[in-house]
Image (spheres, rainbow, N blue to C red):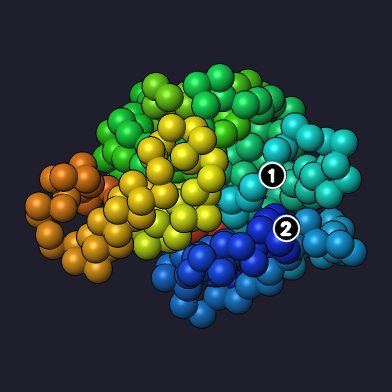
Amino acid sequence: MKFLIIDAYPEKSRAALNDAGMSYAWELYAGMVKRVLPAAEYTVFHPSDVGAEFPGKHNLEQYDGVLWTGADLTIFHTHVPSIKAQIDLAENVFDVGVPSYGSCWGIQMAAAAAGGEVLANTKGREMGIGRKILLTEEGRNHPMMKGKPFVFDAFESHYDIVVKPPEGTVVLAENEFSGIQAMSVTHKKGTFWSVQYHPEYNLHEMSRLTVVREKVLIEGGFFENPEDLEKHVERWELLHSHPDRSDLRWQLGIDEDILNIEIRQQEFSNWVNALVIPYSKEKEQR
């Protein structure tokens, strides 16, 4: 099977994340793919890079799945050519019918490409660990959320949210702070499963991202000063290295939904099994 991984972080942002010790967004997605399908192949596309050549519909047909990583962009800034081109690309994927999956930027892309609306959250940034994400009644019976706890926490780093889901959406999970946290969008020939949170992260990756976002997090009142942030990051990193530390779990309010990769990435595994594999088999029979 072959996947297209779309990492929309601009080159400068990718360098900043990497300099802080964080994996590239595409690498985290490649890791999810290889964990579920070790023999799978993938192509990485950076649509925000100068001179990026966007794949046409014919090129998209070679893939069994399209993956959208997170990104530090604003999707309603459609005056930016590369952002408008990404929305057009997502629309083309819907046209072709290749299954899509994405997190953060991904859920916003699913909404924008199918006619929904994304705006800045009036409550501000959701950062670190999103709390009390609750499956909707539809989510409890939906294949994307099969095996997921009815209430869970997840890694978050976003300011924008889906405020108006497009026609063909099933909202699967919500929380009080950001509203929609997971949804399925069926549009034209395609289906796009997406989450606002980051199943691809772990405590180490979240720690490194927190370091990169130091300035905005202190200005936003998440931390009093750099020393405060550093202490918090150190405790996250310690728990990442020693997940059996029950004292740190209790102090940080972290449980298996954050630490267990099977639970954390359940939605992605379900996407592969419920959408990608059947699509791939159907494509072979054409």
Q: Give the amino acid type for the residue marked by disc 1 in the picture.
A: Leu
Asked whether residue 202 appears in the rendered view, the answer is no
- In the rendered structure, the answer to whether residue 173 lies left or right of residue 281 reads left
Q: Quadrant of the N terminus?
A: bottom right
At a point 51% along the width and 65% down the height, the residue shown is 20
Give whichever of 70, 247 is nearer the camera. Answer: 247
Q: Is residue 154 above or below residue 121?
A: below
At numbered mark 2, what does the secondary structure look like: helix, strand or loop?
A: loop
> Most extreme residue toward the left, as rendered?
247
- x and y percent of residue 187 in the render? 69, 35
At numbered mark 1, what does the secondary structure look like: helix, strand or loop?
A: loop
Quickly name the residue at label 1.
73
- In the rendered structure, the answer to whether residue 125 lies left or right of residue 173 reads right
Q: Is residue 234 above or below residue 108?
A: below
Give whichever of 15, 112 is nearer the camera. Answer: 15
Rendered image: mark on residue 277: none
- In the rendered structure, the answer to whether residue 262 lies left or right of residue 242 reads right
**Contact? badges 2 and 1 (CB < 8 Å):** yes
- x and y percent of residue 227 in the render? 36, 51
Q: Give the amino acid type for the residue marked by disc 2 in the picture.
A: Pro
At a point 32% along the width and 40% down the height, the residue shown is 153
At a point 56% along the width and 19% down the height, the residue shown is 122
Q: Is residue 201 above or below residue 95?
A: below
Label 1 neighbour load within 10 Å: few <14, some 14-19, many 20+: some
Rendered image: mark on residue 10: 2
- x and y percent of residue 201 in the render? 43, 57
Label 2 neighbour load within 10 Å: few <14, some 14-19, many 20+: some
- In the rendered structure, the answer to whether residue 281 lies left or right of residue 189 reads left
At a point 46% along the width and 55% down the height, the residue shown is 211
Asked whether residue 31 appears in the rendered view, the answer is yes
